Image (spheres, rainbow, N blue to C red):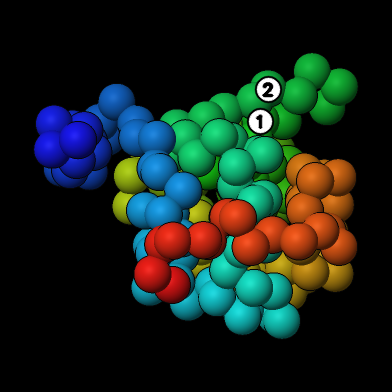
């Protein structure tokens, strides 16, 4: 267990690193510290559930969308067509960040952009995984035992 905690810590310290898989409780605690608990009326459990189904808590998750040429980035799978800039690909870049910022083990950029998305897109319904797996469900298990 100590070795696993050390590996997680080292993953946070490596710049650009190899990415990190947050544990459920690590993510819940981090998102609470970054102000997502209760944001726009959504409990912390909603955000953790959404991240579980979007990226499996992987900070470097990417998913290419062949139907429009966009890519989803990071723990919340934020799309490059609208929210971030991915190289020279066309983007509205509403969050005003490079998509690569969403692949960091530091989730500040992900959270700030997620807040913009939630404000701009009728709340968490912008995330298909949230509407499919989390909306209207009992989500207590996503924060149970996490001290949040």
- The N terminus is located in which quarter? top left
Task: Indicate the position of residue 27 as horizontal and vertical percent values.
Answer: 43, 54
On screen, residue 68 above or below 28: above
Specify whether 74 is left or right of 45: left
On screen, residue 1 above or below 133: above
Name the residue beneath numbered marker 1: 71
Residue at x 41%, y 62% (from the top left corner):
146
Specify whether 67 is left or right of 58: right
Pick whichever, 76 or 73, lies toward us.
76
* Quarter residue 138 falls in: bottom right
Name the residue beneath numbered marker 2: 64
| Sequence-earlier tag: 1 or 2 | 2
CB within 8 Å, label 1 to label 2: yes
Residue at x 46%, y 48% (from the top left corner):
24
| Label 1 – label 2 distance at C-alpha | 4 Å
* Quarter residue 36 falls in: bottom right
In the picture as drawn, the residue positioned furthest to the top comes out as 66
Work out whether residue 66 can be spotted.
Answer: yes
On screen, residue 132 above or below 108: above
Task: Indicate the position of residue 114 as horizontal and vertical percent values.
Answer: 61, 61
């Amino acid at each position: 267990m100590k070795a696993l905690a050390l590996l997680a810590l080292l993953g946070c310290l490596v710049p650009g690193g190899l990415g990190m898989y947050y544990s459920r409780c690590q993510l819940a605690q981090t998102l609470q510290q970054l102000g997502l608990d209760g944001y726009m009326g959504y409990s912390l459990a909603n955000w953790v559930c959404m991240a579980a189904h979007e990226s499996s808590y992987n900070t470097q998750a990417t998913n290419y969308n062949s139907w429009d040429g966009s890519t989803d980035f990071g723990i919340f799978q934020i799309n490059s067509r609208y929210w971030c800039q991915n190289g020279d690909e066309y983007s509205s870049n509403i969050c005003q960040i490079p998509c690569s910022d969403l692949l960091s083990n530091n989730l500040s950029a992900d959270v700030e952009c997620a807040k913009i998305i939630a404000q701009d897109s009728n709340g968490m319904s912008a995330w298909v995984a949230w509407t499919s797996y989390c909306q209207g469900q009992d989500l207590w298990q996503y924060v149970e035992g996490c001290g949040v």
